[in-house]
Image: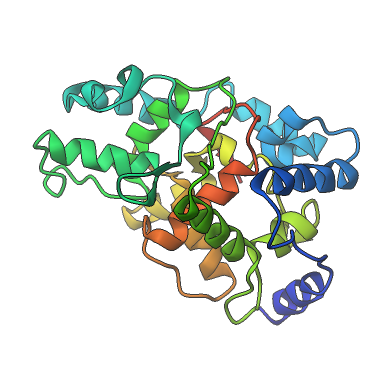
């Protein structure tokens, strides 16, 4: 652990000045892209949807092999069945098909950011589903499988998060941006420290992924999550093992820098997801996907 702290501490002092607070979302996006284009010349915009596999040829080959028979496939199939079983088609535009690219969005009625998982949960409850009895919870499991199915129907669609000309929407965007660049936890790290300034570098055996394109492949199936779930059951694996939403990952990142994870789908994480996703506007969705 001491070695890890030294490594992370060395990484944390190598940052650059974050995007200007008074910049517009569009200028933020342009500067964000330009930074990564300069950092990784030759990596095309759409390749960023592949995360670290756009940077490392050896890892990319291994990843492509695993995607031939993806571990999340059965979960997506079960997610599709649950989507039909719970009558969710009527809750969403276009019957819930090919809409994930528009999430998260700013809801002018409530003055808050809404995520896909929040709308899935609201749909279930409005349709009279006993979510507790059905074991439908945020972050993973059945709800993540439904989200994965909906993401699958949006593959190939370009992320298109809209920041309307509304003071509350801009406040939400700025809040998410501030969270992304703010340092936290005992390690005094921000999202940007790992995934902007030090993207492509190693941290204890892990290649740090670029933030550009991050949101294109969620929900994701992670070996680490799958192993942890199976271990709790004495090695028995199930279809939903390893699957998680982006806000599950936010909580994990907070833990890794020794900060207390926030409750999912509260304003802080929703606003973070709003900014985070907007920065990948124009990149095609390819989720669900396998990640390290």
**Displayed quadrant of residue 11:** bottom right
All told, the count of numbered labels is: 0
Q: Viewer-proximal residue, 48 or 17?
A: 17
Image location (x, y in percent) of residue 217: 56, 35
- The figure's colour scheme reads rainbow
> Is any atom of residue 57 visible in this view?
yes
Give me the residue at 11% from left, 38% from top: 129
Q: Judge left or right: residue 61 versus residue 183.
A: right
Image location (x, y in percent) of residue 132: 14, 49
Q: Could you tell me which quadrant the N terminus lies in? A: bottom right
Above or below for 265 versus 55:
below
> Is any atom of residue 249 visible in this view?
no
Image location (x, y in percent) of residue 75: 37, 31
Q: Judge left or right: residue 131 versus residue 162.
A: left
Give me the residue at 56% from left, 31% from top: 160
Give me the residue at 57% from left, 59% from top: 174
Above or below for 203 versus 12:
above
**Displayed quadrant of residue 195:** bottom right
Image location (x, y in percent) of residue 88: 22, 26
**Displayed quadrant of residue 203:** bottom right
Q: Viewer-proximal residue, 275 or 55?
A: 275
Give me the residue at 79% from left, 59% from top: 197
Q: Viewer-proximal residue, 167 or 93?
A: 167
Above or below for 28 versus 87:
below
């Amino acid at each position: 652990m001491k070695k890890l702290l030294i490594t992370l501490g060395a990484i944390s002092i190598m940052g650059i000045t974050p995007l200007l607070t008074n910049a517009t979302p569009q200028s933020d996006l342009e500067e964000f892209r330009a930074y990564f284009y300069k950092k990784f010349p030759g990596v095309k915009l759409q390749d960023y949807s592949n995360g670290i596999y756009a940077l490392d040829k050896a890892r990319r080959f291994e990843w492509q092999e695993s995607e031939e028979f993806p571990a999340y496939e059965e979960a997506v199939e079960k997610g599709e069945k649950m989507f039909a079983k719970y009558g969710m088609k009527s809750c969403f535009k276009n019957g819930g098909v090919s809409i994930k690219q528009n999430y998260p969005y700013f809801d002018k009625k409530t003055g808050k950011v809404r995520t896909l998982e929040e709308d899935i949960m609201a749909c279930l409850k409005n349709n009279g589903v006993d979510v507790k009895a059905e074991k439908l919870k945020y972050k993973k499991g059945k709800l993540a499988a439904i989200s994965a199915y909906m993401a699958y129907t949006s593959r190939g669609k370009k992320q298109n998060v809209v920041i309307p000309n509304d003071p509350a929407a801009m406040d939400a965007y700025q809040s998410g941006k501030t969270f992304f660049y703010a340092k936290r936890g005992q390690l005094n790290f921000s999202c940007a420290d790992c995934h902007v300034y030090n993207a492509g570098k190693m941290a204890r055996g892990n290649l740090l992924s670029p933030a550009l394109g991050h949101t294109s492949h969620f929900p994701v199936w992670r070996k680490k999550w799958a192993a942890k779930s199976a271990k709790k059951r004495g090695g028995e694996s199930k279809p939903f093992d390893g699957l998680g939403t982006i806000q599950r990952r936010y909580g994990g990142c907070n833990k890794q820098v020794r900060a207390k994870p926030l409750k999912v789908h509260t304003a802080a994480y929703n606003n973070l997801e709003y900014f985070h996703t907007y920065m990948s506007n124009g990149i095609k969705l390819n989720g669900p996907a396998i990640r390290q």
